[in-house]
Amino acid sequence: MFDSSGDVLERRLQEFESFRKERLPVLHKFAEVLGFPDPHLILLKPAQFVSGVSDFFSNQVIEEGDRVWLLTRVGYFLGEFFICVYDGCWKVDEDVGSRTFSRYIVGDFSLVDKYGVDPFELAALYVDTPAPRSLKDQLDDFLNNNGWPAL
């Protein structure tokens, strides 16, 4: 059955609170699985973990069965990065004219004049890049090419 854009938006809005609650324990567990010391800090200071996540997956071959698992965690991670570094928040994009309409994005930034960013789009680019890949380089390229202030 065909889902109209209004149906997708309505579903995303209904699921938003579950999404918000899920991301923190998932990210904490992700940091534990990767063997990071003080895994709770990935939630508070994600910028400090960019190189570690990047290095861990640099040469990994991402099998199709693992793609969604990794994409979800990297998407949550990048979302928290933008929240902490640029003082934004998670939201559902309700702007029908936006290319990220009905997606979970990070927006409402107080430190930059940007509408929003789709961290899952950035995560997909990273996960779908063949090894060797660099999350740090891809993130730096995104920031530089889209006028975000340097870290």
Image (cartoon, helix red, strand yellow):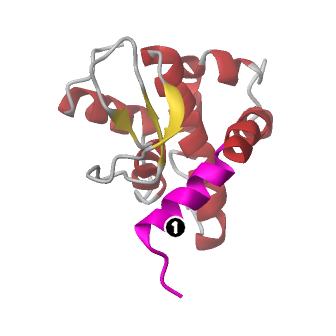
Q: Tell me what residue is drawn at x 36 percent, y 11 percent.
A: 111
Estimate the x, y position of residue 5 in percent, counting from the top left. 42, 66
Estimate the x, y position of residue 41 in percent, counting from the top left. 71, 17
Segment colored magenta: 1-16
Q: Relative to residue 88, is residue 61 drawn left or right?
A: right
Quadrant location of the C terminus in the rendered image: top left
Prevalent SS, magenta region: helix
Q: Residue furthest bottom?
A: 1
Say which amino acid is labelled 1: Asp
Residue 79 lies, with reference to residue 110, above or below; the image says below
| SS state under label 1 | helix
Estimate the x, y position of residue 91 in percent, counting from the top left. 52, 37
The residue nearer to you, when weighing 25 against 94, is 94
Residue 29 lies, with reference to residue 112, above or below; the image says below
Query: Which residue lies under the disc numbered 1?
Result: 7
Residue 80 in sight in this render:
yes
Residue 140 lies, with reference to residue 65, above or below; the image says above
Q: Tell me what residue is drawn at x 47 percent, y 15 percent.
A: 87
The residue nearer to you, when weighing 43 against 31, is 43
Q: Tell me what residue is drawn at x 47 percent, y 51 percent.
A: 103
The residue nearer to you, when weighing 115 against 63, is 115
User: Within the magenta stretch, is there residue 12?
Assistant: yes
The residue nearer to you, when weighing 43 against 99, is 99
Q: Tell me what residue is drawn at x 27 percent, y 34 percent.
A: 141
User: Within the magenta stretch, is there residue 69?
Assistant: no
Quadrant location of the N terminus in the rendered image: bottom right
Q: Residues within 10 Å of mark 1 (few under 14, many from 20)?
A: few
Residue 51 in sight in this render:
no
For the image, the number of numbered tags is 1
